[in-house]
Image (cartoon, helix red, strand yellow):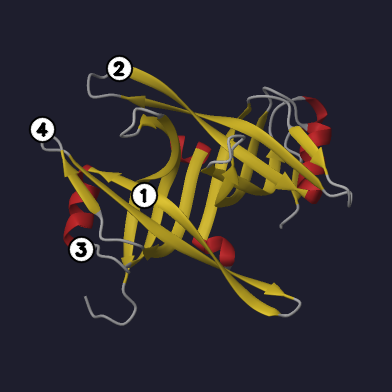
Amino acid sequence: MNNLQNAVNLIGRTGIDPVIRTFENGVKLAKFSIATNETIIEANGKSQKTQWHQIVAWGKKAEMIEKFVKKGQLLAVDGKLINRIFKDASGNNKKITEIQVNEILLINPKKAS
Amino acid sequence: MNNLRNKVQLIGNLGADPEIVTFENGNKLAKVNLATNETYTNAKGEKVDNTHWHRLTAWGKTAEILEAYVKKGEQIAIEGKLITREYETKEGGKKYTTEVHVQEILMLGGGAKNGSKVETKK
């Protein structure tokens, strides 16, 4: 029911090795960015546009990401959009949009896994 | 092809009447905030209600639909893509904002326009 109201699907490549945080209670949080590409056909040919997205994953998904996901990995992500406010190092309020992962699929076209 | 890589679907209620900007060449831009709600049961077994706010932008025909048919509080379903862009603040600093660029709208709440679908892919 909740997924119908707030659903994001992305296919793209990770820009960095995921950053993993482990909390006192043992729960893990994985954070990384992925780039999605869009090919636009214009009058004078094709052009590529890249969008960057902040991804966060918790628990078992974070553990899987820690083990298997590196920079440059092609992924499909199913998640939801979260807009939140956090305090940066200087104490200022900053807004960030993140995609919280519900499901993640590693795509390795030529490797036999 | 491009939509497979970057797709957002939201169902929610408008936080305000859409803000419309009309450019010199006649093109329109609509901006509005949409609230999506989710209900879940937490570890203690309590029901929790959560609201998330999303910034929507729409151009051209899609903006005209928002301007003409949708008001504050009404429920819509949208499909679009995520765009993060840079902009300058009044003090001259650079900031990033993530918006949902709307490609398709389905009006869900309010009168004779219930379930009217408008497809205007951009």
Callout 3 secondary element: helix
Q: Answer whether residue A1 is visible to the viewer in this image.
A: no
Rounded to the nearest whole Å, what is the CA distance between mark 4 and mark 1?
A: 22 Å
* Callout 4 and callout 3 share a chain: yes
Point out residue B97 in the picture as x, y percentages from the top left corner: 54, 43
Q: According to the image, label 3 marks what residue? A: A68
Q: According to the image, label 4 marks what residue? A: A24
Name which residue lies at 71% across and 45% down: B58
Count residues near mark 1 (Cα–Cα under 10 Å), then give few for <14, some for 14-19, many for 20+.
many
Rounded to the nearest whole Å, what is the CA distance between mark 3 and mark 2?
A: 35 Å
Q: Single out the mark in the foreground, 2 or 4.
A: 4
Name which residue lies at 59% across and 43% down: B88
Task: Mark 4 or mark 1: name the one nearer the start of the chain.
Answer: 4
Name which residue lies at 60% across and 32% down: B34
Point out residue B37 in the picture as x, y percentages from the top left corner: 49, 27
Q: According to the image, label 1 marks what residue? A: A55
